[in-house]
Amino acid sequence: LAKLMELYDENPFRIKSYSQAYVILRKVEKTFASMSLQEIDAIPGVGSGISGKIKELLETGNMKALDVYLNKTPPGILDMLAIRGFGPKKVKQIWKTLEIETIGELIYACNENRIANLKGFGLKTQQELIENLQYAQESKDKWLYSKAFILASELIERLFTLYPLERFQISGELSLQLPIIQKINITATIIPGMEPVSYTHLDVYKRQG
């Protein structure tokens, strides 16, 4: 949300508060789903506004304030914001100056040295961008084992809450403890007629990943 707000030149004080909250929240060891709103609100640096957004995200799988920006931002621009070392200001400059809206167009522009010619970039910055783009392409849809294991554990915890009489366990690549994971597999017992489970909270992690 902070990155997208900066992309659209929103209030810098609000942007700073969200950015600082992100740094604080990512260090919290407990899962937010296991915490009450009062506990989240009591985290230093997290006010009622941010804790309310976390509650909205947990309960609905969406955040209205974030969706406003997601709906008006081209998917390729969102991909660019996820590139290491490529902040909102640089993304906006490339988007608005060169009208580049996809990773493919960005790679093409780098190969033609059009990025290096932009004010504030240069050949060194362009080369770093090329290297980070290559890394992003190679690691797309892949997870480190440690992160995938945390997500799978949270998902199993949620499934146990919804279906306490069933059994669920990690399988596939995660059970083999491969260093790089491409898919989270969970083996489950199923009762005929069981309602399908919504994984919207996992989709949120995918967007962040």
Image: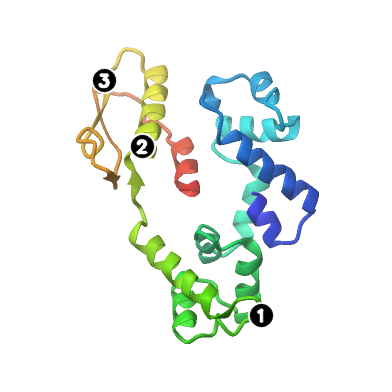
Q: Is residue 134 left or right of residue 82?
A: left
Name the disc covering residue 143, or none: none
Tell me which numbered mark, 3 or 2, is placed earlier along the sequence. 2
* Mark 3 crowdedness (10 Å alpha carbons): few <14, some 14-19, many ≥20: few
Tell me which numbered mark, 1 or 3, is placed earlier along the sequence. 1
How much space separates mark 2 and mark 1, taking CA atoms? 40 Å
What is the total number of numbered labels drawn onto the structure image? 3
Residue 8 point in image, percent of width and height: 71, 61
* Mark 2 crowdedness (10 Å alpha carbons): few <14, some 14-19, many ≥20: some
Specify the amino acid type for callout 2.
Answer: Ser
Residue 7 point in image, percent of width and height: 67, 61
Pointer 1 residue = 119
| Between 196 and 89, the one nearer to me in the picture | 89
Q: How is the image coloured?
A: rainbow
Q: Secondary structure at mark 2?
A: helix
Depicted 81 relative to depicted 188: above or below: below
Name the disc covering residue 191, or none: 3
Depicted 68 relative to depicted 178: above or below: below
Specify the amino acid type for callout 3.
Answer: Ile
Q: Is residue 37 left or right of residue 10?
A: left
Depicted 164 relative to depicted 110: above or below: above
Q: Is residue 47 left or right of residue 69?
A: right
How much space separates mark 3 and mark 2, taking CA atoms? 31 Å
| Residue found at x 38% / y 67% | 134
| Between 198 and 65, the one nearer to me in the picture | 65
Pointer 2 residue = 146
Specify the amino acid type for callout 1.
Answer: Lys
Q: Quadrant of residue 5?
A: bottom right
Depicted 148 relative to depicted 5: above or below: above
Q: Secondary structure at mark 3?
A: loop
Residue 125 point in image, percent of width and height: 54, 73
